[in-house]
Image (cartoon, grey):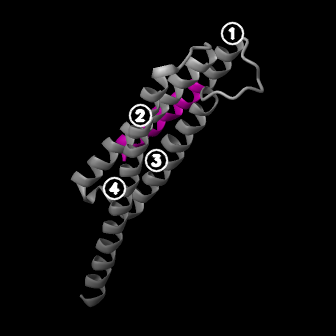
Amino acid sequence: MNRLFTAICVYLGLGLVSGLAFREITKHSDWPATDHTQLGVVHTHLLTLGVIVLLAVLALEATLRLSDSPRLFAWFQGIYHAGVLVSAAMMFVRGMLTVQGADLGAMDAMVSGIAGIGHILLTVGFVLLMVLIRRAIVRRATEETVTVRA
Protein backbone atom coordinates (compact mmCIF):
# COMPACT_ATOMS: atom_id res chain seq x y z
CA MET A 1 0.00 0.00 0.00
CA ASN A 2 2.92 2.31 0.67
CA ARG A 3 4.23 1.89 -2.90
CA LEU A 4 0.79 2.70 -4.29
CA PHE A 5 0.52 5.81 -2.13
CA THR A 6 4.00 6.92 -3.21
CA ALA A 7 3.05 6.45 -6.86
CA ILE A 8 -0.12 8.48 -6.32
CA CYS A 9 1.92 11.31 -4.82
CA VAL A 10 4.40 11.21 -7.72
CA TYR A 11 1.56 11.35 -10.27
CA LEU A 12 -0.03 14.21 -8.34
CA GLY A 13 3.23 16.14 -8.55
CA LEU A 14 3.69 15.34 -12.24
CA GLY A 15 0.10 16.31 -12.99
CA LEU A 16 0.38 19.64 -11.21
CA VAL A 17 3.77 20.45 -12.75
CA SER A 18 2.55 19.55 -16.24
CA GLY A 19 -0.43 21.87 -15.80
CA LEU A 20 1.90 24.68 -14.81
CA ALA A 21 4.24 23.84 -17.69
CA PHE A 22 1.34 23.98 -20.15
CA ARG A 23 0.33 27.40 -18.91
CA GLU A 24 3.85 28.84 -18.97
CA ILE A 25 4.96 27.27 -22.26
CA THR A 26 1.89 28.44 -24.16
CA LYS A 27 2.08 31.90 -22.56
CA HIS A 28 5.74 32.39 -23.50
CA SER A 29 5.16 31.02 -27.01
CA ASP A 30 2.22 33.39 -27.57
CA TRP A 31 0.07 30.36 -28.26
CA PRO A 32 -3.58 31.42 -28.73
CA ALA A 33 -5.70 30.25 -25.79
CA THR A 34 -8.38 28.99 -28.19
CA ASP A 35 -6.02 26.71 -30.14
CA HIS A 36 -5.88 23.07 -29.03
CA THR A 37 -2.62 21.38 -28.12
CA GLN A 38 -1.87 18.08 -26.42
CA LEU A 39 -0.05 20.03 -23.72
CA GLY A 40 -3.41 21.09 -22.37
CA VAL A 41 -4.52 17.57 -21.51
CA VAL A 42 -1.31 16.03 -20.15
CA HIS A 43 -2.12 17.16 -16.62
CA THR A 44 -5.69 15.84 -16.72
CA HIS A 45 -4.47 12.46 -17.94
CA LEU A 46 -1.82 12.24 -15.23
CA LEU A 47 -4.27 13.29 -12.53
CA THR A 48 -6.98 10.92 -13.73
CA LEU A 49 -4.93 7.84 -14.61
CA GLY A 50 -2.24 8.37 -12.00
CA VAL A 51 -4.16 9.74 -9.04
CA ILE A 52 -7.84 8.88 -9.31
CA VAL A 53 -7.44 5.38 -10.76
CA LEU A 54 -4.66 4.50 -8.33
CA LEU A 55 -6.69 5.85 -5.39
CA ALA A 56 -9.37 3.36 -6.43
CA VAL A 57 -6.73 0.61 -6.63
CA LEU A 58 -5.49 1.62 -3.16
CA ALA A 59 -9.04 1.27 -1.80
CA LEU A 60 -9.37 -2.12 -3.52
CA GLU A 61 -6.05 -3.19 -2.03
CA ALA A 62 -7.27 -2.21 1.43
CA THR A 63 -10.54 -4.12 1.07
CA LEU A 64 -9.73 -7.04 -1.25
CA ARG A 65 -5.96 -7.45 -0.70
CA LEU A 66 -5.08 -7.45 -4.40
CA SER A 67 -1.42 -7.96 -3.49
CA ASP A 68 -2.22 -11.46 -2.23
CA SER A 69 -1.37 -12.33 -5.85
CA PRO A 70 2.08 -10.70 -5.63
CA ARG A 71 3.49 -11.59 -9.05
CA LEU A 72 0.35 -10.50 -10.89
CA PHE A 73 0.12 -7.34 -8.77
CA ALA A 74 3.75 -6.49 -9.60
CA TRP A 75 3.08 -7.05 -13.32
CA PHE A 76 0.01 -4.83 -13.12
CA GLN A 77 1.93 -2.02 -11.46
CA GLY A 78 4.88 -2.14 -13.84
CA ILE A 79 2.83 -2.31 -17.01
CA TYR A 80 0.26 0.24 -15.85
CA HIS A 81 2.90 2.79 -14.79
CA ALA A 82 4.78 2.31 -18.06
CA GLY A 83 1.55 2.86 -20.01
CA VAL A 84 0.65 6.06 -18.15
CA LEU A 85 4.15 7.51 -18.42
CA VAL A 86 4.71 6.63 -22.09
CA SER A 87 1.29 7.98 -23.08
CA ALA A 88 1.77 11.21 -21.11
CA ALA A 89 5.29 11.69 -22.43
CA MET A 90 4.14 11.38 -26.03
CA MET A 91 1.29 13.80 -25.40
CA PHE A 92 3.85 16.25 -24.02
CA VAL A 93 6.18 15.75 -27.00
CA ARG A 94 3.36 16.22 -29.53
CA GLY A 95 2.15 19.30 -27.66
CA MET A 96 5.61 20.83 -27.55
CA LEU A 97 6.13 20.24 -31.27
CA THR A 98 2.75 21.79 -32.02
CA VAL A 99 3.38 24.88 -29.89
CA GLN A 100 6.83 25.33 -31.42
CA GLY A 101 5.27 25.17 -34.88
CA ALA A 102 7.44 22.23 -35.90
CA ASP A 103 6.52 20.35 -39.05
CA LEU A 104 5.73 16.93 -37.65
CA GLY A 105 6.22 15.12 -40.95
CA ALA A 106 7.87 11.75 -40.29
CA MET A 107 7.90 12.44 -36.55
CA ASP A 108 4.11 12.29 -36.53
CA ALA A 109 4.08 8.56 -37.26
CA MET A 110 6.81 7.90 -34.69
CA VAL A 111 5.07 9.86 -31.93
CA SER A 112 1.74 8.21 -32.78
CA GLY A 113 3.34 4.77 -32.75
CA ILE A 114 4.97 5.26 -29.38
CA ALA A 115 1.74 6.75 -27.99
CA GLY A 116 -0.06 3.67 -29.32
CA ILE A 117 2.36 1.45 -27.42
CA GLY A 118 1.58 3.47 -24.29
CA HIS A 119 -2.14 2.90 -24.83
CA ILE A 120 -1.59 -0.82 -25.39
CA LEU A 121 0.32 -0.97 -22.10
CA LEU A 122 -2.54 0.85 -20.37
CA THR A 123 -5.01 -1.65 -21.81
CA VAL A 124 -2.93 -4.60 -20.63
CA GLY A 125 -2.62 -2.93 -17.22
CA PHE A 126 -6.40 -2.56 -16.94
CA VAL A 127 -6.93 -6.19 -17.98
CA LEU A 128 -4.45 -7.30 -15.32
CA LEU A 129 -6.30 -5.16 -12.78
CA MET A 130 -9.58 -6.86 -13.68
CA VAL A 131 -7.94 -10.29 -13.30
CA LEU A 132 -6.59 -9.22 -9.89
CA ILE A 133 -10.01 -8.02 -8.79
CA ARG A 134 -11.67 -11.23 -9.98
CA ARG A 135 -9.11 -13.38 -8.16
CA ALA A 136 -9.58 -11.36 -4.98
CA ILE A 137 -13.37 -11.68 -5.16
CA VAL A 138 -13.16 -15.45 -5.69
CA ARG A 139 -10.60 -15.77 -2.87
CA ARG A 140 -12.80 -13.75 -0.53
CA ALA A 141 -15.88 -15.80 -1.40
CA THR A 142 -13.92 -19.00 -0.75
CA GLU A 143 -12.70 -17.69 2.61
CA GLU A 144 -16.24 -16.70 3.63
CA THR A 145 -17.55 -20.13 2.65
CA VAL A 146 -14.88 -21.86 4.70
CA THR A 147 -15.58 -19.57 7.68
CA VAL A 148 -19.34 -20.22 7.53
CA ARG A 149 -18.83 -24.00 7.38
CA ALA A 150 -16.39 -24.03 10.29
Between label 4 and label 2, give the one nearer the viewer: 2
Q: CA distance from mark 4 to mark 2?
A: 23 Å
Q: Residue at x 56, y 18 (%)?
A: 97
Residue linked to disc 2: 113
**Which residue does the image show at 61% across and 13% down from the upper left?**
100
**Distance CA(mark 2)–CA(mark 3):** 26 Å
The percent position of residue 131, horizontal first and vertical second, equals 33, 62
x, y percent for residue 38: 60, 29
Q: Residues within 10 Å of mark 4 (few under 14, many from 20)?
A: some
Q: Quadrant of residue 2?
A: top left
Residue 28 disc label = 1
Q: Is residue 19 left or right of residue 144?
A: right
Of the two numbered discs 4 and 3 in the rendering, the one whose residue sits closer to the viewer: 4
Q: Nearer the viewer, residue 96 or 64?
A: 96
Q: Amino acid at mark 2?
A: Gly
Q: Of label 4 and label 2, which has the lower sequence position?
A: 2
Q: Nearer the viewer, mark 1 or mark 2?
A: 2
First in sequence: mark 1 vs mark 3: 1
Callout 2: SS: helix
Q: CA distance from mark 4 to mark 3?
A: 14 Å
Crowd rating for badge 3 (residues with CA inside 10 Å; few <14, some 14–19, many 20+): many
Q: What kind of element bears circle 4?
A: helix
Give the residue number, with chain letter if any, for mark 3: 54
Q: Amino acid at mark 4?
A: Leu
Which of marks 3 and 4 precedes in the sequence? 3
In the rendered structure, the answer to whether residue 87 lies left or right of residue 70 reads right
Mark toward the start of the polypeptide (2 vs 3): 3
Residue picked out by circle 4: 128
Asked whether the viewer can see residue 2, the reply is no
Give the spatial CA distance, label 4 vs label 1.
Answer: 42 Å
Q: Which residues are magenta?
A: 1-18
Mark 1 near mark 3, Cβ–Cβ under 8 Å? Answer: no
